[in-house]
Each structure stands twice: as C-alpha cells, then as structure tokens.
Image (cartoon, grey):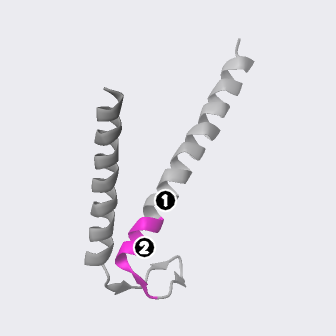
Amino acid sequence: MSRLRNLVQLLVLLLVILAIVVFMLENQQSVSISFFGFSSVGLPLSACLLIAILLGMISGPLMGMVFGFRRKMIAKRHV
C-alpha cells in the first residue's frame, strides 16, 4: 500500500511540474509593470505571475500571524 501511495504522489508531483513548465513556455510575452510610479523591466508574463503568487503566499500567512497576535493580545487585556 505504501508503494502505491508513493507512486501516486510521484505522479501528482510530475503532473504539477509538467503543468508549470507548460505554463511558463506558453506565457513568454514580455510585460512591464507600473506600480505607484515605479516601472519594472520587461519580464516574461509567467515570471510576473510567479512573483505575484509567491508574494501572496508569503504575505498572507504573515498578515494572519500579525492580526492573530493582535487579537490574542486584546483578548488577554479584557480578561
């Protein structure tokens, strides 16, 4: 049973890697992003999307920890 589970996990991992490679190859158009007056150099669209996803994956949990910590501190004061 363990060997079957490992095989399924390996197949899922390979499918995810294949999907990422296809996504990267299909989105090679060069884009420049302008944000608050700052402009980026021309990067492939796939790289911009990857950077945005990674920043969201990092900033989301960090904000949750900060606001969760604040909520705990406020709850301790009122007890």
Query: In terms of secondary structure, where does tag 1 sit?
Result: helix
Name the disc covering residue 54, or none.
1
Q: Main secondary structure of the magenta part?
A: helix
Residue found 27% across the figure and 61% down from its top:
19
Q: Is residue 6 left or right of residue 57?
A: left
User: Disc 2 designates what residue?
Assistant: 48
Task: Quarter of the image for the N terminus: give it.
Answer: top left
> Could you tell me residue 78's position as x and y percent?
70, 16
Q: Sequence order check: which comes first, mark 1 or mark 2?
A: 2
Q: Is residue 36 left or right of residue 11?
A: right
Q: Along the line of sight, which residue is nearer the eye, 48 or 13?
A: 13
Name the disc covering residue 18, or none.
none
Residue extending farthest to the top is 79
Q: Is residue 45 magenta?
A: yes
Q: Quadrant of residue 42?
A: bottom left
Query: In terms of secondary structure, where does tag 2 sit?
Result: helix
| Amino acid carrying mark 2 in the image | Cys
| Amino acid carrying mark 1 in the image | Leu
Residue found 35% across the figure and 29% down from its top:
2
Q: Quadrant of residue 75?
A: top right
Figure label count: 2
Task: Quarter of the image for the C terminus: give it.
Answer: top right
Magenta stretch, residue numbers: 42-51
- Residue count near mark 1 (Cα–Cα under 10 Å), binned few <14, some 14–19, many ≥20: few
> Could you tell me residue 69's position as x and y percent?
66, 32
Residue found 33% across the figure and 73% down from its top:
24
Q: Quadrant of residue 26?
A: bottom left
